[in-house]
Amino acid sequence: MSTVNEPELADLDPFDLMAAEATRVDAFYRALADGNDWLMPTRCAGWNRRDLLAHLAGVEDDTAARLAGAPLPASYVGETALTRRVHLPGLELLDEWRDRVDRNDTELRRRGPHAAFPGPGGAPYPLGRWSFYLASERAIHADDAGVPIGEAESAARLDWRLRFARSALTEQRNGQVGVVADRGAQVVHLMGEFNGDAVRLPDDQFVEAVSGRLPPEADVPFHLRNALAVLG
């Protein structure tokens, strides 16, 4: 049985993807030395590695709240989660995050991909599809923190992230951004006011664009860059 009613994602298990990303983040942070390694800057402006992990803990707080039927405000996940954990030593913070991950992931998998889940605005949303967003969140922030990706797993990781990036873009932009695959790249263009503006992005750069992580030097018009950034 497919996990989501969408052909491009039907053969992927978002719970396995979530688990793999959590394991990768956990191993990376546990190997950090005390002190400066935890305070290294990340791709998230103003956040060091410790801040980023506190944010990920806030995401898990929100997931637990959604499982209980009471989503947290976005401000909690963005900032309150950091201030609530400012006193925790790094490894204690890591243990707290991992404990929440394990409990949430177990419950998400138990309920199954077709269960209802409070999505944006609290409206019912397929749990399996929401779990893809959670897997993507972990993957994006793993990259933000500098978590290394082994050569043996990089192709499969790019594949699922590419497929989900295309899917999320279609969903969140309501078809206002066209995407056509072209030999290891994605040709994207805007409809409506900017109809005709198009750019060809290699697959990995397309994933970065949809994650809101396209580097400033990338030759992509500002309005198209903004339209692509729907994750992260």
Image (cartoon, helix red, strand yellow):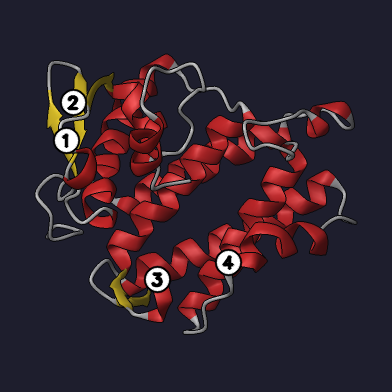
Mark 3 touching mark 1, by CB under 8 A? Answer: no
At numbered mark 3, what does the secondary structure look like: helix, strand or loop?
Answer: helix
Q: Secondary structure at mark 2?
A: strand
Task: Measure how far apart labels 3 and 2 are at the Cα level.
Answer: 28 Å
Instruction: Find the residue positioned furthest to the front.
Output: 193
The Cα atoms of the two marked residues, 3 and 1, are separated by 24 Å
Q: Are marks 1 and 2 in contact (CB under 8 Å)?
A: yes
Label 1 neighbour load within 10 Å: few <14, some 14-19, many 20+: many
Q: Disc 1 marks which amino acid?
A: Val
Quarter occupied by residue 207: top left
Please name the amino acid that badge 2 sits on: Val
SS label for mark 4: helix
Q: Which residue is mark 3?
A: 120
Q: Which residue is mark 4?
A: 74
Return the x and y of residue 149 as percentages of the image width and height.
48, 23
Q: Mark 3 vs mark 2: which is more N-terminal? A: 3
Report x, y in % for residue 11: 16, 46
Instruction: Give the CA separation, mark 4 to mark 2.
Output: 32 Å
Q: Which mark is residue 179?
A: 1
Hey, what amino acid is under mark 4?
A: Ala
Q: CA distance from mark 4 to mark 1?
A: 29 Å
Residue in view at x 41 percent, y 45 percent: 136
Q: CA distance from mark 1 to mark 2?
A: 6 Å
> What type is the residue that disc 3 sits on?
Pro
Look at 41% across and 80% down and name the residue there. 122
**Mark 3 crowd level (few <14, some 14–19, many ≥20, 10 Å Cα):** few
Q: Are marks 4 and 2 in contact (CB under 8 Å)?
A: no
Q: Which residue is mark 2?
A: 187
Residue 201 spot, x, y in % from top left:
28, 21
Q: Residue at x 64, y 37 (%)?
A: 44
- Left or right of residue 179, residue 51 in this image: right
